[in-house]
Amino acid sequence: MSPWNLLFPFNKNAGEMLGKLNLNDMEPYIEKFFSQFIPQTQKFFSEQPTNPAFSFMSPAPGTSMIGNNKGLAVFETHEHVFIRIQVKDADQLKEIKIFHTSNQVFLEGLPGKKEREVITLPAIVKKKGAHAVYKEGILEIRIQKSQDLQFSQIDVSEG
C-alpha cells in the first residue's frame, strides 16, 4: 500500500496517479496558469528604470504607490516603515539629505531633482531611532513606528 493512499482515502488510485506524475508535463501547465491569472507579475518584472544614473526602485507586490513617483517603494511592517530607493553610484549618497517628521520624510539632493521630495508615510513614526543603510545599490530608510494610543473625545453640540 502506498503512503499516498493514507492522504487520499476517498480515491484508492490517487497514490498510483501521483507516482506516475511527470514533472516535465506540469511545467507548461503552471506557466499557463500564472500567465492567465497573474498578468501583472510579468509586467512588474519586465519594467526597467528610466534613468540609469539614479532611479526609484520598483515596489514589491502589494506595496502602495505614494504620490506621483511610480517607482517609490514605501511599505510598513508591524514595527517599522521602510522606504527603498535604488542608487546606482555610492558617490551620490554624499549629496542626499534625509529628514523626517512624525508622518513625512523629506529627501533633498536627489540626482536629477532640484526640488525637495516629500513622502507621506503610511503610519505615525517615532522621532528617534531611524537609520538609513546603503547596500548593493539600494538605499533603505527604516523608521520605527510609534504606538500612540492617546485618544481625545470630541463632544458634538447642537446649534
Image (cartoon, rainbow, N blue to C red):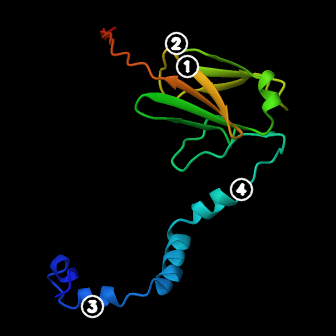
- Badge 4 crowding class, 10 Å Cα cut-off, few under 14, some 14 to 19, many 20 or more, is few
Q: Which mark is residue 130?
A: 1
Q: Quarter of the image containing the N terminus?
A: bottom left
Residue topped by disc 2: 128
Mark 4 highlights which residue? 47
Q: Is residue 63 left or right of residue 55?
A: left
- In the depicted structure, whether residue 11 falls above or below residue 89: below
Badge nearest the viewer, 1 or 3:
3
Disc 3, SS = helix
Place of residue 13 in the rendered image (x, y in percent of width and height, measured from the top left): 22, 91
Residue 8 visible in the current orientation: yes
Upstream in sequence: badge 2 or badge 4: 4
- Say whether marks 2 and 3 touch (CB < 8 Å): no
| Between marks 2 and 3 in the image, the one whose residue lies nearer the viewer | 3
Question: Considering the image in quadrants, where does the C terminus appear?
Answer: top left
Report the mark closest to the observer, 2 or 4: 2
